[in-house]
Amino acid sequence: MLGDDAELTAAVRAAQDGDETAFRTVYRAVQPRLLGYVRTLVGDPDAEDVASEAWLQIARDLERFDGDADRFRGWAARIARNRALDHIRMRGRRPVIGGDETELTGRPAESDTAGEAMEALATGSTLSLIARLPQDQAEAVVLRVVMGLDAKSAAETLGKRPGAVRTAAHRGLKRLAELLGGDPESGGGLDALPPQREPHGRAVTSASVTHTRARTQKDM
């Protein structure tokens, strides 16, 4: 375990000991991708509120978490998914997000592989397009490619077998590659996710989450 994963693991463990600076580090490392996942489930208008609810639960339950960076991302994704599904049940249905597919179909696909789509997932338009895939494919793509979970962790999040998640991710990426037409200008890599907007409404910042975490620790 090297690089960012090692740093995230150390930050999670420090946050479990009550280090609020470490918790802010965890929040900054995970929030952009977690928010992207939530957007594929509930749509852009509600994503920040749902993600905020997820972080409040993460802060409250962090002391009971056990594992490394990869397991933390999977754990956080499961919490966010549960909050998103609660939101969807209250609203009644999964939204259709973004524009239509013609935004990204300027020319025929040059390849039937998923490589181009993986490279293009950094763009906001592509993240919106993912939400137009069948839900099993959309979730598998975001969990495997954007959240960076391995097949086992993604399967645990979705309550499915790893093989089913791999298949759904492959089909989703292949469809995205067809829609994107293999355009090399469409994205700049998975580490360049689009800047996230400042939270609004009931959305919380890392500072407010850590404040709540400190308060809930005292209450426990």
Image (cartoon, helix red, strand yellow):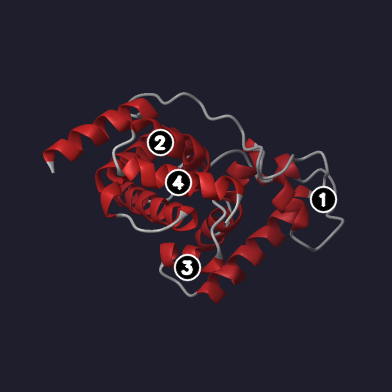
**What kind of element bears circle 4?**
helix
* Mark-to-mark CA distance, 1 and 2: 40 Å
Residue 166 image offset from top left, x and y in percent: 59, 69
Residue 107 image offset from top left, x and y in percent: 85, 47
- In the drawing, does residue 7 fall left or right of residue 213? right
Which label sits on residue 22? Answer: 2
Residue at image position (62%, 46%) is 129
Q: Would you name the residue on which mark 1 appears?
A: 182
Rendered position, 38 above or below 201: below
Residue at image position (35%, 58%) is 66
Which image quarter: residue 213? top left
Q: Is label 4 in contact with label 2 (beta carbons under 8 Å)?
A: yes
What is the number of callouts on the image? 4
Which label sits on residue 40? Answer: none
* Mark-to-mark CA distance, 3 and 4: 25 Å
Mark found first going from the N terminus, 1 or 4:
4
Mark found first going from the N terminus, 1 or 2:
2
Q: Would you name the residue on which mark 3 appears?
A: 155
Three-letter amino acid code at disc 3? Ala
Three-letter amino acid code at disc 1? Gly
